[in-house]
Amino acid sequence: MHKYTKEEKNFIRKNYHNHTNKELTKIFNKKFNTDVTVKAISAQGKELKLHKDDEFKGSFKKGHTPQNKGKKLEDYLNDEQIKNVQRTQFKKGHRPHNARPIGSERFGKDKYIYVKIGEPNIWLPKQALIYENYIGEVPKGCKVIFADGNKYNFELDNLLLVTSEELLKINSNGFYYRNKEATKCGLNMVKIMNEIKKRKRNNE
């Protein structure tokens, strides 16, 4: 069983909320040269009483394809299971009384604003939606963050596209400031650090 150092615990505290356990485990092992499991990282998060932002909860991420996609119920359920599913399914055309229309906004437990973009219950962080509408696509594995740390400042020059690894380094190096220009400089520093590391590796 891995015994976490103070540095490792602080690293998990800083990055647990905005990474999936799988992502965090991969970057943690790379940074500290360890081989802890996803289950171990999850357990440590619970021990430290940490919580995930809404978009990083659960096992599936945006772009994940369920194993039963495109299959009929009878392909993976027996007769009794099919009957149980059909009893609890909404009839075609039925709409729950508390269903919210597409375009609705709500606050997540992480205090971010989410926008409903599809049925039956598909929500996207507002900053990501604005970025995609006005700047460009948010690639898989990337996130949109607020340069000044204000979750409600949706000005385009306040939205930064970062990879999961870049965000991790921004947080761990203390490059996330309330001044958006300072944070942008911090992101550039991270990109330079990554490029130097890449070139060193290529020259070895």
Image (cartoon, grey):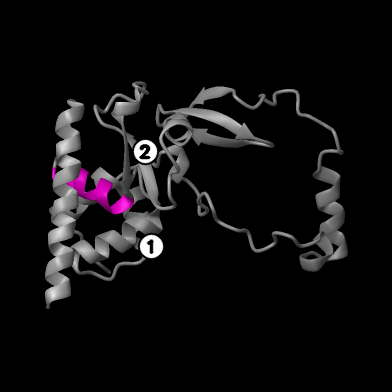
Corner quadrant of residue 77: bottom right
- Residue identifier under label 1: 38
Q: Residue at x 43, y 49 (%)?
A: 139
The image position of residue 185, as x and y in percent, is: 15, 38
Question: Considering only order in the chain, which callout, 2 or 1, is on the residue closer to the N terminus?
Answer: 1
- Mark 1 vs 2: CB contact within 8 A: no
Quarter of the image holding residue 180? top left
Callout 2 amino acid: Val
Q: Is residue 169 magenta?
A: yes
Would residue 3 be counted in the magenta stretch? no
Which residue has dot 2 on it?
Answer: 144
User: 12 or 197: nearer the eye?
Assistant: 197
State the predominant SS element of the stretch in magenta. Answer: helix
Where on the picture, by quarter, is residue 95?
top right
Q: Secondary structure at mark 2?
A: strand
Tell me the crowding category of disc 1: few under 14, some 14 to 19, or many 20 or more residues within 10 angstroms, Cα based.
Answer: some
Asked whether residue 30 appears in the rendered view, the answer is: yes
Q: Report the quarter where the C terminus lies.
A: bottom left
Query: The magenta stretch spans which residues?
Result: 164-173
The label nearer to you, 1 versus 2, is: 2
Residue 99 in the image, given as x and y percentages of width and height: 69, 26
Which element is circle 1 on? helix
